[in-house]
Image (cartoon, grey):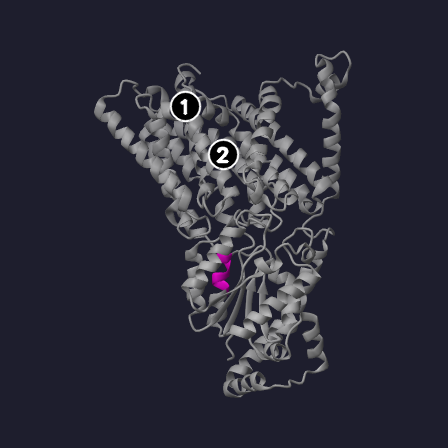
């Protein structure tokens, strides 16, 4: 393209965005808004692509759409295919439990519609533990692929229809606002998938970037900017950068504000920063340009794609990741650099021609590839292994079940029946409050407590005192938790037959609020509330405060801290829970972390979920705490 500019400062901005995303995945509690880095990627793409298209239109009176598609496919596909094949091969050999839905995952990624599949079938982007898919982050690639396919056609239509570029600018800004409003309307706090993954609800930064291309064309910016203009742009740039960093550190993706204007504000400030960096009359372009940023910026695509597989496989293999907190980042950079040198750059400029002739030449002795043809051997082996994984991988209701999954499924069926009985008993107990209080007081005063045969079994199995057994059998409990509680619910309800247990795999703290509100409104929230949340990710003190306000100060809250040695948020979650007990008198911490420390025999192979023995120990710990500090009504 004649007169086109390479804006090196964007390498630095990409580095900043990528750093936010990586740090969010490594330290989700410390960099709460790091996920917003993808909005910067969207905005940069919208600006650069539109700017180049408008230049081409102005110079040639047309846009070579097919040529653009070809360049985009050669840029996006090679690394994506390598990631899909290599990751699937690894899972086939070492992590078969992650192969669930693999066929759907592969074909939707290849067609760039994976984000829409995730809306109906995938996990929340903010579910940081529950069998997290190494492909979750590829939603972004599908969205940007759709934009690349649709945008040239839309832009040509706008350029033909409106001769006044100001009208196009207004339309694009208007559509960006519409996308933000759509996010606001469709936002569901219990399930963010629709608005987080939706192509329509994530258009705002891309459209704002595209609108900037009409307002701020890169080739029309005067490098000889006067002092006042330079001062204004520098202030805008510094202010925008400060806001971006602040929001990147604080704006939680599980809170309402992110979807009720937060992402819109972040996108606006991102576009302002893009405008300042793009202007050749400011120093920002230089500040964001250096060899390190250029090196990372060129590899940013690969770093983004490889990050999740490396993190998930590393965390699955290494039990205590706190020992080497930066090792994951080092591995990601090394693999991405290797991929950039030997996959991205060579294949982006390679003329494949007929694919069958290419494959034939690759293995022929006299081919132009020479000795490099031997690389085909490991490539073919990896491809075969990945193909086996795709063919044998289970669908949504596949047959691959671990002992843990089977136990949770069994407990869920039993718990649903027990819950109905527990609620009826709790209602009757409230009607006979004085009689119930007298019974419990009598149990506490008894010196020689007589147990039934069933109660004696419970006493022996869970190593409880007779009085503890009797009290637990009479007390009402409401349990709200994640997969840990789902795993232990059978034992809990054996000791506490009047316990209502709501446990859901992957549940996060912020998802429990609506459930607790519903139980309270129905009169089904007992005086003792047992909470086991935090396994799947860190949470804020505000989210904990909301739960406390919903439960109320007159109920006792028993919060089980977490044992998640394979995740870096373990200590952060436990500190948050411990601090809450100091702030609120009705919160009692059940210290599962210390009790289970170094007790490897208590857990399944994931080192997180209690096995049969661990479930008994967990239940004993919970029982003793509730019996000691619980409310009797």
Task: Residue 36: say if magenta.
Answer: no
Closest to the camera, between mark 1 and mark 2, is 1
Instruction: Please give the label number shown on residue 289.
Output: 1
Residue 353 appears in the figure: yes
Residue bearing the label numbered 2: 147
Residue 63 lies, in percent from the top left, at 46, 22
- Please determine whether, in this image, residue 379 is positioned above or below residue 531: above
Mark 1 or mark 2: name the one nearer the start of the chain: 2
Q: How crowded is mark 2: few (under 14 residues within 10 Å), some or many (20 or more)?
A: some
Circle 1 sits in a helix, a strand or a loop, which is it? loop
Specify the segment rendered in magenta. Answer: 509-515
Extreme residue toward the right, this view: 365
Residue 620 lies, in percent from the top left, at 63, 68
- Please determine whether, in this image, residue 464 is positioned above or below residue 196: below
Q: Main secondary structure of the magenta part?
A: helix
Of 130 and 223, nearer the camera is: 130
């Amino acid at each position: 393209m004649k007169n086109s500019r390479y804006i090196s400062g964007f390498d630095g901005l990409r580095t900043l965005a990528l750093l936010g995303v990586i740090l969010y995945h490594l330290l989700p509690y410390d960099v709460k808004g790091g996920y917003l880095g993808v909005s910067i990627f969207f905005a940069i793409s919208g600006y650069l692509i539109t700017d180049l298209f408008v230049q081409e239109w102005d110079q040639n009176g047309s846009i070579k759409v097919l040529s653009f598609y070809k360049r985009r496919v050669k840029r996006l596909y090679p690394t994506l295919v390598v990631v899909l094949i290599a990751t699937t091969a690894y899972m086939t050999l070492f992590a078969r439990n992650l192969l669930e839905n693999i066929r759907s995952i592969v074909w939707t990624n290849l067609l760039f519609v994976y984000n829409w599949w995730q809306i109906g079938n995938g996990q929340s982007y903010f579910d940081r533990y529950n069998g997290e898919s190494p492909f979750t982050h590829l939603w972004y690639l599908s969205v940007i692929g759709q934009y690349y396919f649709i945008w040239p056609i839309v832009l040509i239509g706008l350029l033909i229809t409106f001769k006044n570029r100001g009208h196009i600018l207004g339309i694009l800004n208007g559509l960006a606002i519409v996308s933000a409003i759509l996010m606001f309307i469709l936002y569901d706090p219990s399930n963010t998938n629709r608005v987080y993954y939706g192509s329509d609800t994530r258009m705002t930064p891309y459209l704002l970037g595209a609108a900037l291309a009409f307002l701020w064309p890169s080739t029309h910016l005067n490098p000889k900017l006067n002092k006042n203009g330079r001062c204004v742009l520098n202030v805008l740039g510094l202010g925008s950068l400060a806001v971006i960093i602040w929001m990147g550190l604080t704006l939680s993706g599980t809170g309402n504000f992110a979807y009720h204007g937060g992402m819109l504000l972040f996108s606006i400030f991102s576009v302002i920063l893009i405008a300042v960096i793009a202007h050749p009359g400011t120093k920002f372009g230089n500040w964001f340009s250096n060899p390190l940023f250029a090196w990372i910026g060129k590899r940013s695509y690969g770093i983004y794609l490889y990050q999740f597989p490396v993190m998930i496989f590393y965390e699955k293999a290494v039990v205590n990741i706190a020992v080497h907190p930066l090792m994951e980042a080092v591995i990601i950079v090394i693999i991405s650099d290797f991929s950039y040198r030997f996959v991205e750059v060579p294949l982006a400029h390679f003329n494949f021609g007929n694919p069958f002739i290419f494959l034939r030449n690759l293995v022929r002795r006299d081919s132009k590839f020479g000795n490099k043809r031997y690389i085909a051997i490991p490539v073919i082996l990896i491809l075969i292994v990945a193909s086996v994984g795709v063919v044998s991988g289970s669908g949504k209701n596949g047959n691959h079940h671990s002992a843990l999954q089977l136990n949770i499924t069994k407990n869920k069926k039993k718990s649903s029946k027990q819950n109905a009985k527990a609620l009826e008993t709790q209602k009757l107990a409230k009607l006979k409050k004085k009689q119930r209080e007298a019974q419990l007081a009598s149990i506490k005063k008894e010196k020689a407590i007589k147990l039934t045969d069933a109660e004696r079994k419970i006493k022996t199995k869970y190593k409880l005192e007779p009085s503890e057994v009797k009290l637990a059998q009479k007390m009402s409990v409401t349990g709200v938790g994640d997969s840990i509680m789902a795993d232990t619910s059978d034992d809990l309800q054996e000791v506490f037959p009047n316990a209502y247990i709501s446990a859901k795999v992957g549940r996060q703290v912020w998802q429990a609020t609506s459930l607790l509100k519903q139980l309270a409104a129905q009169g089904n929230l007992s005086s003792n509330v047992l909470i086991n949340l935090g396994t799947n990710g860190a949470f804020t003190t505000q989210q904990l405060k909301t739960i406390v306000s919903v439960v109320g100060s007159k109920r006792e809250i028993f919060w089980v801290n977490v044992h998640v040695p394979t995740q870096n948020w373990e200590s952060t979650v436990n500190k948050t829970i411990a601090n809450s007990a100091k702030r609120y008198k009705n919160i009692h911490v059940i210290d599962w972390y210390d009790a289970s420390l170094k007790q490897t025999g208590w857990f399944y192979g994931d080192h997180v979920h209690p096995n049969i023995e661990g479930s008994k120990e967990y239940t004993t710990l919970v029982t003793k705490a509730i019996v000691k500090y619980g409310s009797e009504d």
